[in-house]
Image (spheres, rainbow, N blue to C red):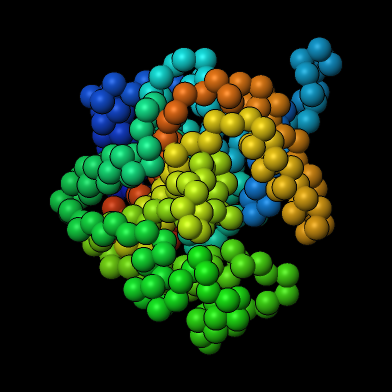
Amino acid sequence: MNTCPPQAALRLRAELYRLLRTFFFERGVLEVETPILSAAGNTEPNIQSFTTTFRGHVDAGTPERWLRTSPEYPLKRLLAAGVGDCYELGRVFRNGEAGGRHNPEFTMLEWYRVGWDHGRLAREVEDLVQAALALVGRRAEVRVCSYRELFLDKLGLDPLTAALDALRQALGESSVDPEGLTRDDWLDLLITHRLQPDFPRDRITVIHDYPASQCALARIRHDDPPVAERFELYLGPHELANGYHELNDAAEQRARFERDNVVRRARGLREVPMDANLLAVLDAMPDCAGVALGVERLLMCLAGTDTIADVLAFPFAQA
């Protein structure tokens, strides 16, 4: 086993970090740093967190601490305090996510633009990815489409209205255990098994306006049927970024956190404490759009590899 860090990958990462900081400095976006350990966790049922225990004085607060799965909640608290456009480039942690394209600790770039919607922010993500591609002498064509258009074009079905049986049949010969799968699970499987693998490698694909049931922390626009003001950006078959026109309604956000924990209980998972600090200020957060981008995924695209270990100094098994 080769345990030596790949020098070319280390240098490429350093070049990318320099480009990212220059990109945001020139656009007036402030770099900030927020806590990695929190008294609250991520309630999202499909994301599992690491926890640790603080052994110091009880006055320091809750002993159990959660390693962040993203810097989203503290960044939103800064937005509510009036910091304005900001970004963070730092490590995040997700338990159980290890494999060819996943590492339990990885680098996330997350940023917020005050007064922007998800469409305008998606265009800035395109600009950033094109600038990163220029580091290796490449450029990508861009395709922008709605979630609905993507499914209609490639699979001939409407993901917002199609019957559940139609979604199951569209998965084709893929072997999947259907036990406990929801409508959104089937839609996700169609993305990952039928659509995403065929995205051309030299194309940026931006998908916007997701089903309202996949809103996460995004606003819902009351079309017929309603859609979440959310986008995802892919470079080739790799999902790089997930962005929202951000929800700033504390009561609605609390209800979504509570629904997440209901799903967790149904799956036999532990409930996760909601972020009370975020909920206390969310109503004061300005209208904004935010996005998180996986740095290793972008590095994989730049390096021309489908294996995350190729762009890490030391992968999880060697850490």
Name the residue located 79 percent from the left edge and 44 percent from the top edge.
271
Relative side of 244 to 137, left or right: right
Q: Position of residue 259 (x, y in %)?
A: 72, 47
Q: Position of residue 209 (x, y in %)?
A: 43, 53
Q: Total number of numbered labels?
A: 0
Q: Is residue 260 above or below residue 15?
A: below
Q: Position of residue 55 (x, y in %)?
A: 81, 23
Q: Nearer the viewer, residue 255 or 290?
A: 255
Q: Quadrant of residue 236?
A: bottom left
> In the displayed image of the protein, which residue is found farthest to the bottom?
173
Relative side of 114 to 204, left or right: right
Any part of residue 265 in sight: yes
Name the residue located 34 percent from the left edge and 39 percent from the top edge.
121
Q: Nearer the viewer, residue 118 or 275?
A: 118
Name the residue located 67 percent from the left edge and 43 percent from the top edge.
256
Any part of residue 309 in sight: no
Q: Position of residue 84 (x, y in %)?
A: 41, 19
Name the residue located 59 percent from the left edge and 26 percent from the top edge.
282
Q: Is residue 232 above or below residue 244?
A: below
> In the displayed image of the protein, which residue is found farthest to the front?
224
Relative side of 143 to 115, left or right: left
Q: Is residue 245 above or below residue 262?
A: above
